[in-house]
Amino acid sequence: MQQKKRAFRAFHKECLHLTSQTTNWKELAELGKDCDTLICGSDQIWNFNLTEGLHPAYYLEFAQAGQRKIAYAPSMNQNSIPEQMERQLLEKLQTFHAVSIREQNLTEPLTRLLGKPVSVVLDPTLRLDAHGYSPLLQRCTLRLPAHYVFIYCLHQDHLKPLRKLAERYAEENHVQIVYCSKLDLFRSEYACNIFRYGPEAFVYAIAHADYVFADSFHAAAFSVVFHKDFALYTPGGSHSRMNTLFSSLGISERFVKEPGELLPPIDYESVDVHLQNRRRASLEYLI
């Protein structure tokens, strides 16, 4: 875990242009005081189950009078808005100049609540094509097999079914397995665990995989960017943001229901047409 933390700190230092870290509300307000526009997003900053309620920082409540507040692609990762949350949401979002989210199923209730249009836009990771990630991939020093299947496991109770899928594919196609998990797996077909490496290793492993098996939205997103066949095993959770993305790209059936099930190849020529349309719409929203 310490090696992973060092890798992420190095990535932050070398690849991201960040302000100083704030430790209290006053510092946060001071940091943004000279901005014309404040943008909140992305990922699950509006998932109140993760943030233990509606966190004021993620709704830009430190903004000063005259500053424009915009939401770009935050995710609630909910199938609906609980009635008891509506008043709080209205109070926090009614001062926003524009609101967008990642879940199609929430646009209608949010539009009704706010009395103004709510857009659905792409997750920022999908705004770039594969070429846009070249500098990041060039930074990676991993040495992986020429052909492999990649497992990305966020939740340990999903590891067994993901392994079953990957092992079946590896056996049928005579390839090894690269994986990212807190647990090390000691079998000959498992070539490498990239858990201790930084974010560039995650992107690199997907970019060069023959197939991706995961329980993660962003594993799916990067699989789309790099035109990889992929399958998701996410039983029991909310699929709202994934359903929105997959439906808009014409690849709705990428969830496996049985651990031994393999899905058909993806027609990326068709996917790219949909994706380019979504990229244009997302850029138009920001403009």
Image (cartoon, rainbow, N blue to C red):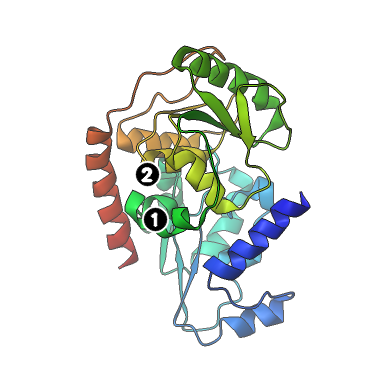
Circle 2 Cα neighbour tier, 10 Å, few/some/many (<14 / 14–19 / ≥20): many
- Dot 2 or dot 1: first in sequence order is 1
Residue sitting at x 61%, y 50% = 85
Q: Residue at x 33, y 53 (%)?
A: 131
| Quadrant of image for the C terminus | bottom left
Q: Is residue 104 left or right of residue 59?
A: left
Q: Nearer the viewer, mark 2 or mark 1?
A: 1
Q: Is residue 213 visible?
A: no
Q: Relative to 31, say whether 275 is above or below.
A: above
Q: Is residue 183 left or right of residue 58?
A: right
Q: Quadrant of residue 162?
A: top right
- Provide residue 101's location: percent of width, then percent of height: 44, 52
Residue at 55% from the left image edge and 82% from the top image edge: 64
Q: Is residue 3 above or below residue 94?
A: above
Where is mark 1, residue-wise? 134
The tag on residue 225 is 2
Identified by mark 1, the residue type is Ser
Looking at the picture, tell me which residue is in the foreground, 249 or 141: 141
Disc 2 marks a residue whose amino acid type is Val
Whether residue 178 is visible here, answered yes or no, is yes
Query: Which is nearer the eye, 168 or 112?
Result: 168
Q: CA distance from mark 2 to mark 1?
A: 12 Å
Q: Quadrant of residue 164?
A: top right
Is residue 82 placed above or below 53 in the rendered structure? above
